Image (spheres, rainbow, N blue to C red):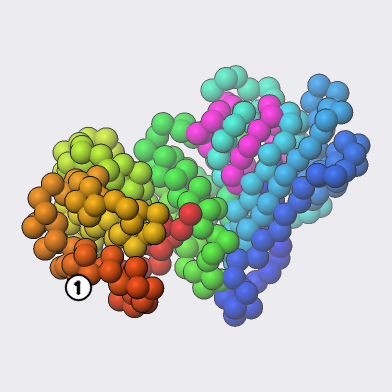
Amino acid sequence: MAATGNGQEPGRALADRGVPRSVLDSAGLAPRQAVALWQESMGFFYDVRLRNGGDDRFHFHAEALHFGGIALSSYRCVAQNFDRSRARIGRDGLDQITVQLCLRGSHGRRDGGPDEKACPGDLIVSDLAQAQSTGTSGIDSLNLTMPRRLLAPLLKAPDEHNLRVVPGNAPLTALLRGHLISLYQAAPAMSGRDAEAVTRPTLELAAAAINSTVAEENAASVQLALTGEIRRHVDRHVTGRDLSAETIAALFGISTRKLYYLFEPHGGFSRYIQEERLRRCRAELVDPGHRHEAIGDIAGRYGFGHRKSFVRAFRRCFDMTPREMRALAAQGRSLTREHGADRTLWQWIRELR
């Protein structure tokens, strides 16, 4: 169901090399060879059988990213059965817990009902120290694999979650889903030290989603993830006119007071939106593809309807006027004063694409 780490201990070697990544793809293999490679690879953890008698067009793609203490993997494959027997558990001694995020298809107990199958957006918990008998349809998934020694202390009844489905519409599930997708996208550009830094917050957020509650000691990680989700929403809708505190708070199911609290480190919610829009204006002003556009048109696209107030805000943010910024870019001069050069790791992760 999910790959585990490669046995590499966290430390300086990881920190120096970045995030280790492995890719396994059956492109170029005959279907029978692809099936054999897939079963051999997954055979470290499960007995795997294709459903419906196999597929003469069988193909798979799998990736694994190793963050020191935890691993994030993905795979895309056809319908199949996974089995993990007590005999296998006794032989391999694996003691890890995987949270699988279902992106497409379904996965769950073969003898279970509809409510015991994870569908797109849902999570299913897999305890590798317990027996399993599951089946999937054709599936895409993201899989977070964590050692029990790290995750169990954060869980309520840590031995009672095997094959439990956590609904995707639960707020904490949504936060974990957004975090894992962002982490997967950001990993190629992360340093090893960055990867180690995200381990603990990721564990705490996974535990909160599994527990369906937020323990006091995990609150900071959950709040960080919630802030990240709100910021990504703002980024996607930055040209929209309806980004009021009341609208965003209602959308994310929190009070406006909570929203203001979350954005205090960024100078407040309104200031964050304004500065995000100013950054977009700056990017277009220095882009040769927008050189033909009037500065007022660019500003208006991001909600700045009054020229003087736009110029004041722009100068306050970048220490020069919009016209000066465009002129420097046109001359090919280096713009050495980058707004936000001291932004935190978490902010850079959000902005990576």
Q: Magenta segment: does it hold 337?
A: no
- Look at the image and give the residue range highlighted in magenta: 116-143
User: Where does residue 224 sit, x and y in percent of width and height?
Assistant: 34, 55
Picture layout, residue 148 above or below residue 169? below
Residue sticking out furthest to the front: 292
User: Where does residue 265 sit, x and y in percent of width and height?
Assistant: 23, 63
Q: Which of 53 and 321 is in front in this view?
A: 321
Q: Name the residue under label 1.
A: 319
Q: Nearer the viewer, residue 315 or 288?
A: 288
Residue sticking out furthest to the top: 113
Tell me, yes or no, if residue 335 can be seen here. yes
- The quadrant of the rendering that contains the N terminus is top right
Q: Is mark 1 on a helix, strand or loop?
A: loop
| Lateral position of residue 97 relative to residue 268, left or right | right
Tell me, yes or no, if residue 249 can be seen here. no
Q: Main secondary structure of the magenta part?
A: strand
Picture layout, residue 325 above or below residue 86? below
User: Where does residue 103 sit, x and y in percent of width and height?
Assistant: 56, 35
| Lateral position of residue 203 relative to residue 84, left or right | left
Q: Look at 21% across and 65% down and name the residue there.
A: 323
Q: Quadrant of residue 170?
A: top left
| Lateral position of residue 190 relative to residue 304, left or right | right
Task: Check disc 1: other Cα within 10 Å, few if <14, some if 14-19, many if 20+.
Answer: some
